[in-house]
Amino acid sequence: DGGITQSPKYLFRKEGQNVTLSCEQNLNHDAMYWYRQDPGQGLRLIYYSQIVNDFQKGDIAEGYSVSREKKESFPLTVTSAQKNPTAFYLCASSTGGTDLNQPQHFGDGTRLSIL
Amino acid sequence: KNQVEQSPQSLIILEGKNCTLQCNYTVSPFSNLRWYKQDTGRGPVSLTIMTFSENTKSNGRYTATLDADTKQSSLHITASQLSDSASYICVVSSFNDYKLSFGAGTTVTVRA
């Protein structure tokens, strides 16, 4: 079955440590996204990529970095510069292009906590 | 600033009853409005997508309505089941870019 796989399900970060969250999709989607979800708030966009080897900052990109070397993969690194990284991180993908009416498909998230 | 406001924040209903969730938005220019269902600890799953020309769309026991003039949408759940317990998120898209504006969600708890 096609879908989005995020790993790990749970992740713990030590002070000063960088951690990388994995996101893989087999939907053949061009566009991929990373969101952060905090209790009582709507999802906030961290980074997005419309095509391989290209990505754009979202609304809260500070302290995060991404790469898009392959169409199916869009890993997110939470750097030590992100002072409040505890959150639920969601990866999504869509067909992208000019059709904005296509749904975004989400993975099942990674919950990141501070040790 | 594009905003999406959902109400109520949470609600509890008895199994078999109906309920209606509300979504008001200020996103402009409007492209489409989506409702997602998010189970605890899982990613959101799309229920419906409506463009400005559509005023109602159904997906099983879920029926979404849209009034683009008043910038309001509702999601009606008919004959609720225990599996309907989840957070329901309203998401609005603008023609300007690929970004989506997310509401904070309404948490629905269905009790036997």
Image: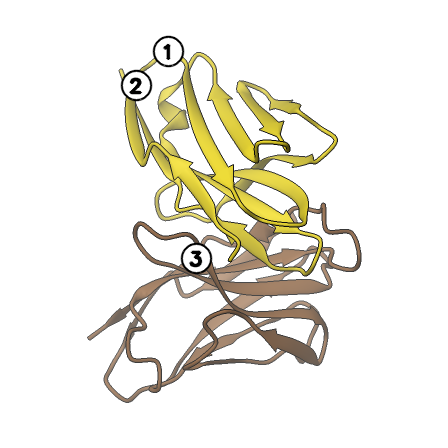
Chain colours: A brown, B yellow
Give the side of residue B23 with respect to residue A51, left or right. left
Q: Which mark is residue A109?
A: 3
Question: The residue tagged with tag 1: helix, strand or loop?
Answer: loop
Q: Position of residue B42 (x, y in %)?
A: 42, 47
Residue placed at 36% from the left, 53% from the top?
A41
Please identify the residue farthest to the bottom as the structure is shown. Answer: A16
Residue type at the position of mark 3 = Gly
Between B89 and B27, the one nearer to me in the picture: B27
How many other residues sit within 10 Å of disc 3, few (<14), some (14-19) or many (≥20)? Answer: many
Query: Given this view, does label 3 or label 2 mark the residue nearer the observer?
Result: 2
Q: Residue furthest right?
A: A98
Badge number at residue B17: 1
Question: In 3D space, how far apart are the residues under numbered discs 3 and 2 (Cα atoms)?
Answer: 28 Å
Q: Are marks 1 and 2 on the same chain?
A: yes
Occupied quadrant, residue B79: top left
Marks 3,1: beta carbons within 8 A: no
Q: Mark 1 packing: few (<14 Cα in 10 Å), some, or many (20+)?
A: few
Residue A65 percent location from the top left of the image:
50, 81
Q: Is residue A109 above or below residue B53?
A: below
Question: Are the residues flagged by discs 1 and 2 in contact, CB closer than 8 Å?
Answer: yes
Q: In the drawing, does residue A58 fall left or right of residue A108?
A: right
Q: Residue at point 39% right, 26% down?
A: B83
Mark nearer the viewer, 3 or 1: 1
**What is the chain letter for disc 3?**
A
Q: Amino acid at mark 1?
A: Lys
Identify the element where label 2 is drawn: strand
Q: Is residue A5 above or below residue A105?
A: below
Q: Which residue is mark 2?
A: B13
In percent of width and height, residue B67 lies at 61, 28
Estimate the x, y position of residue A56 in percent, counting from the top left: 62, 75
